[in-house]
């Protein structure tokens, strides 16, 4: 790209960005964060990262960024941030003349099954892309969509958090606007029943998981079921999109649980195989399925790369479901922790 004729500037930009929960899972990637298959997610409301970035001309010999998490330096984030800033420099080479002081915090606790990489990397990508717009005096207004591709480079699932409601990431031919490079909002074509959807997260185990998502994605490259998984993910994208459009909650439940269990089946059948589920994850799954069939209430579960369960259900059932969670499921959660979230409207400037 042409280099902006920038005068060296300084300033502060902040964004609050939510996490999201995938129904069709992104699992496996190629090249630079290009997903092997399309994924579909719901953006959350309460579980957010708040990130503020101060930018100023960089002094010679100085690192490109300084990072604070909850007001304290946190070196454990540095490898991921170093990789992210390599992408930033590739996209906007002149930004290597700047220093960024990043202060970030989350509205939710760590290791609880809420994807902090999605919220934190989307918040940071929004800040950096808006800074680029300001410094390069872009003649169009900045919109969150402009940050989609940089968010993807930070963490694949982060690009889906750029939109509120329901998002699709990855090329899926029937949806012309879909792309491997950034997510697309599919919220407008979604049935109203899915606009007020709850996600109650059962924190079965709050320890750091033993295998990272990055390692799990790589294990898909040599996976014996890789082709079968691709076929399944495309078929489930089709089924999910039609259920989201038609308000077909039965089909939604079927796809949602199949994807959750397939994700963990792929982990177990990787080489080396690994198990992130805990005994209480399985106990809770049995209870959820039993409750659904007894009460005829449309509730289902999904899992990220970890043992904690996301319970998804229409908002109209909130009261009865929260009471049932309190009496039947809380005892199986670490410190009885359950986080109640719901579909949200996407990132907000701070
Ligand atoms: O964005 P990453 O690299 O942390 O991968 C996310 C993978 C899953 O959370 C398991 C699935 C998904 O689509 O969010």
Image: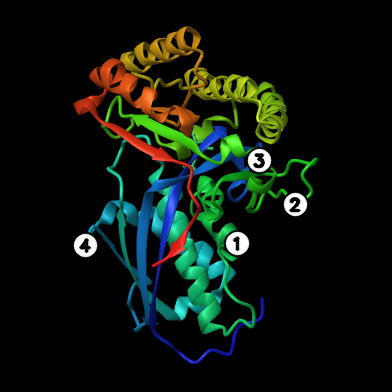
Colouring mode (rainbow / by chain / secondary structure / one colour):
rainbow
The Cα–Cα distance between marks 3 and 2, rounded to whole angstroms, is 16 Å
Which residue is at the front of the view, 322 or 228?
322
Asked whether residue 318 appears in the rendered view, the answer is yes
Residue under pointer 3: 190
Does residue 262 sit above or below 210 in this rendering? above
Q: Nearer the viewer, mark 4 or mark 2?
A: 2
Query: Of helix, strand and loop, which one carries label 1?
Result: helix
Q: Let me know if residue 307 appears in the view.
A: no
In x, y percent, where is residue 146? Answer: 60, 65
Question: Viewed as shown, does residue 331 lie left or right of 187?
Answer: left
- Identify the residue at horizontal 34%, vertical 57% (top origin): 78
Sequence order check: which comes first, mark 3 or mark 2? 2
Which callout, 4 or 2, points at the residue further toward the start of the chain? 4
Q: Give the mark nearer the N terminus: 1 vs 2.
A: 1
- Mark 2 neighbour density, 10 Å: few (under 14) some (14–19) many (20 or more): some
Q: Reply above or below: 130 against 152.
A: below
Specify which label sits upstream in the sequence, 4 or 1: 4
Label 1 neighbourhood size at 10 Å, few (<14), some (14-19), many (20+)?
some
- Distance from the alpha carbon under mark 4 to that under mark 3: 39 Å
Q: Which residue is mark 2?
A: 177
């Amino acid at each position: 790209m042409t280099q902006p004729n920038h005068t060296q500037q300084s300033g502060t930009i902040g964004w609050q960005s939510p996490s999201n929960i995938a129904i069709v899972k992104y699992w496996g990637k190629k090249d630079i964060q290009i997903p092997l298959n399309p994924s579909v997610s719901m953006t959350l409301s309460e579980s957010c990262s708040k990130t503020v970035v101060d930018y100023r001309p960089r002094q010679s010999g100085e690192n490109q960024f300084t990072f604070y998490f909850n007001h304290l330096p946190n070196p454990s984030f540095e490898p991921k941030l170093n990789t992210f800033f390599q992408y930033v420099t590739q996209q906007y080479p002149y930004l290597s003349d700047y220093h960024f002081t990043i202060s970030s915090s989350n509205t939710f606790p760590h290791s609880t099954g809420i994807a902090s990489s999605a919220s934190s990397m989307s918040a940071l990508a929004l800040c950096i892309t808006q800074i680029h717009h300001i410094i390069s005096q872009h003649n169009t207004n900045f919109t969150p969509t402009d940050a989609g591709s940089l968010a993807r480079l930070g963490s694949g699932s982060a690009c889906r958090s750029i939109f509120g409601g329901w998002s699709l990431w990855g090329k899926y031919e029937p949806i012309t606007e879909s792309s491997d490079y950034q997510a697309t909002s599919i919220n407008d074509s979604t049935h109203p029943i899915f606009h007020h959807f709850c996600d109650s997260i059962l924190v079965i185990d709050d320890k750091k998981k033993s295998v990272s998502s990055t390692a799990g994605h790589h294990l898909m490259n040599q996976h014996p079921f890789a082709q079968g998984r691709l076929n399944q993910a495309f078929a489930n994208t089709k089924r999910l999109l039609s259920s989201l459009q038609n308000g077909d909650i039965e089909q939604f439940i079927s796809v949602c649980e199949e994807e959750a269990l397939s994700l963990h089946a792929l982990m177990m059948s990787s080489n080396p195989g690994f198990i992130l589920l805990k005994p209480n994850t399985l106990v809770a799954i049995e209870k959820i399925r039993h409750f659904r069939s007894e009460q005829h209430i449309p509730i289902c579960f999904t899992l990220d790369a970890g043992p904690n369960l996301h319970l998804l259900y229409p908002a109209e059932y909130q009261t009865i479901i929260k009471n049932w969670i309190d009496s039947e499921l809380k005892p199986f959660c670490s410190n009885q922790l359950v986080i109640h979230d719901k579909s949200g409207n996407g990132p907000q400037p701070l």
